[in-house]
Amino acid sequence: MFDLTRSELHQRIAVAVASVFTLGAVAAVAVDPLIDQAEPQSASIVEPLPITWETGASNTQRFVQSEKIRRGDSLGAVLGRMGAVDGQFLKFVATDPTARKILQLKAGRTVLAELDGSGRVHRFSYRLGGLEDDTESSKASQPSARILVQRFEDGLKASESQVPIEKSVEMRAVEVRSTLFAATEAAGMPDGVVSQIADIFGDDIDFQRDVRRGDRLRVVYETLREAGSFDAPVAGRILALQMTVGGKRLDAVWVDSVVEGSPRGGRYLTFDGKAVQQGFLRNPLEFSRTTSGFTESRLHPVFKDWRAHKGVDFAAPAGTKVRASGDGIVDFAGTQRGYGNVIVLKHNQTHTTLYAHLQDFSEGLKLGSRVRQGDVIGFVGQTGWATGPHLHYEFRINNEPTDPMTVALPNNQPIDAATRRKVTELAGQFRSQLARLDELRLARFE
């Protein structure tokens, strides 16, 4: 051991103790390490603090959502896509007589809902009327029924009201750069306009093969929309159109048939008063492909034996609209063994048409219903003896099936003098309107 004097020992102890206090509490400055210090007494201070619960944005803020109904949708599926979580609302719709009409969901229509952040429905609006099918002028002026469900302090309430329909006329001109369908879509034309063009000129133009780059279209058509609605307008009837395909010009104008002073249907005639369309559509579907033709011998896809096929099969997605190929009366609507759900239309004493394997019939269609050419009568399905969704279509003359793709279709009714005068008047009017489009630059789309 090292020998230390008493003075040196005291100095080293003082330094060591001071170092410990310095490291343990840096705030302890100039404290004599050899003198005991009294510890400060602890004290608790309790003060009442007011607590205010703020209502979160999820409970107060509301959002308006819109959603287009898809084929096969349930109300729960539509609400789910909108972000709604509201069992009380679903129960109310299922039990309230007025609100229950919402369950008649139709593909293509739009619903509007006002939701809060927790997913509760405060307002829900659904249109019952089908604007997408109301292309006749007589229907366009009819009000549309709308169901409104609202949430109040004492619960949910439903009401039904009539909303007037606004009708306007639009004109478009396009030049094809790739396909007609791409050009019209890029120009903002409703789908219904394009399908009508295909119907009007379908006997003269193969829209898949004949239309080429540089061909032109000018068209005047109606649009329908609920007053005050945020929905996009729905295509009404085409009033006039001109189309140049491969240097050949085609034109058509809609002429009402007037009986006892009121419009009763009508048809398309050329600007010089000739019939544009045949008395029947060759294809009851807007867009499809032929999978089986008319033949006396075909390997049956289900029974795997050789049988005659007395019609034409058109493949299309389930739910595709099936149209009446001509004016007529429903002679049968029901189930027939291998045909599944089937409709037979009687057009006159000689001609009938048959539509088989349907998923469903149009709402309100029944025995004796009168339909017009192009009316939607049902939807493509897979009922009966079918291996996939398609339409089996038969064209019968004196109840004998014939090939609808090759048979000479009956001509339209003769054109009387009064109708010709009307055509001359309308053609002059629309020629003037369509000529204005030439003053503008034709829209060019890829």
Image (cartoon, rainbow, N blue to C red):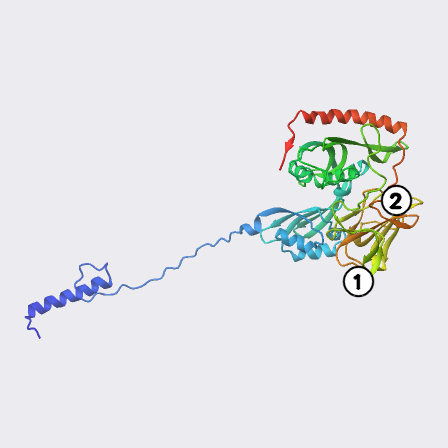
How crowded is the residue under tag 1: few (<14 C-alpha within 10 Å), some, or many (20+)? few
Q: Report the residue marked by disc 2.
A: 328
The quadrant of the rendering that contains the C terminus is top right
Up-down relation of residue 247 to residue 89 (above or below): above
Pick whichever of labels 2 and 1 is earlier in the sequence: 1
- Secondary structure under tag 2 reads strand
Compared across the picture, whether 385 is left or right of 48 comes to right
Going 67% across and 55% down the picture, which residue do you hit?
77
Q: Position of residue 189 (x, y in %)?
A: 69, 37
* Residue at 75% across, 26% down: 431
- Callout 2 amino acid: Gly
Q: Which residue sits at x=81%, y=30%? A: 270
- Residue 83: numbered disc: none
Please indicate, yes or no, whether residue 302 appears anywhere in the rendered image: yes
- Vertical arrangement, residue 388 with respect to residue 178, above or below: below
Residue type (three-letter) at the residue carrying disc 1: Lys
The residue at the point 7 percent across, 73 percent down is: 2
Give x and y (percent) for residue 387. Answer: 76, 59
Q: Quadrant of the N terminus?
A: bottom left
Residue nearest the viewer, comparing 60 with 90: 90
Q: Residue 236 location, x and y as percent?
A: 75, 37
Which residue occupies the foreground of this view, 232 or 429?
429
Q: In the image, is 392 to the left or to the right of 209?
A: right
Residue denoted by label 1: 304
The kind of secondary structure element at disc 1 is: loop
Q: Is residue 332 left or right of residue 152?
A: right
* Pointer 2 local density, CA inside 10 Å: few below 14, some 14–19, many at least 20: many
Q: In the rendered view, does 54 fall on the left or right side of 30?
A: right
